[in-house]
Image (tube, rainbow, N blue to C red):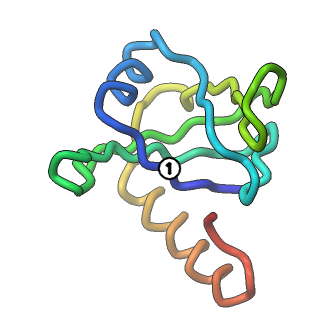
Amino acid sequence: MLHELKTWPCYYEALLSGDKTFEIRRNNDRGFQRGDTLLLQEFRPELNQYSGREWFVEVTYVTNFGQQQDYVVMGIRGFEGHTTRPQACLDAERAALDKSKGAGGGVR
């Protein structure tokens, strides 16, 4: 499943540099699982807008050990060879998501 997630610039940069290889997120309504794809979208809270930078990562591990209720830690790995998907891939994935939304599925 694909999950679109806001990511603040300081965390986004740490992810791109490889210093941060995990995400901690609330999980009470998403059901994050190993094998899911996260679309991490850099969000500028001071401007209340997205920067346009996006990065697809794969969830490699999920645990709630030692976390607040309804939170999980996810091990993540960027897709090989790039930090963002080519526009053609983005267009195809979004078209598939739009189609699945009409069938009761979609991004959470």
Asked if 87 appears above or below 44 in the picture, the reply is below
Displayed quadrant of residue 70: top right
Which residue ends up furthest to the bottom in the rendered image?
A: 102
Asked if 11 appears above or below 44 in the picture, the reply is above
Image location of residue 5, percent across then percent down:
50, 50
The amino acid on which the numbered mark 1 sits, given as a three-letter code, is: Leu
Q: Nearer the viewer, residue 61 or 55?
A: 61
Image location of residue 61, percent across then percent down:
78, 27
At 39% from the left and 18% from the top, the residue drawn is 14
Image location of residue 21, percent across then percent down:
57, 18
> Tag 1, which secondary structure?
strand
Image location of residue 30, percent across then percent down:
72, 56
The count of marks equals 1
Which residue ends up furthest to the top in the rendered image?
A: 19
Displayed quadrant of residue 44: top left
Q: Is residue 105 left or right of residue 23?
A: right
Displayed quadrant of residue 83: top left
Q: Quadrant of the C terminus?
A: bottom right
Residue that numbered label 1 is attached to: 5
For label 1, the crowd category at 10 Å Cα-Cα, with few meaning under 14, some 14 to 19 and many 20 or more, is some
Q: Quadrant of the N terminus?
A: bottom right
Q: Nearer the viewer, residue 65 or 78?
A: 65
At 50% from the left and 69% from the top, the residue drawn is 94
At 75% from the left and 27% from the top, the residue drawn is 67
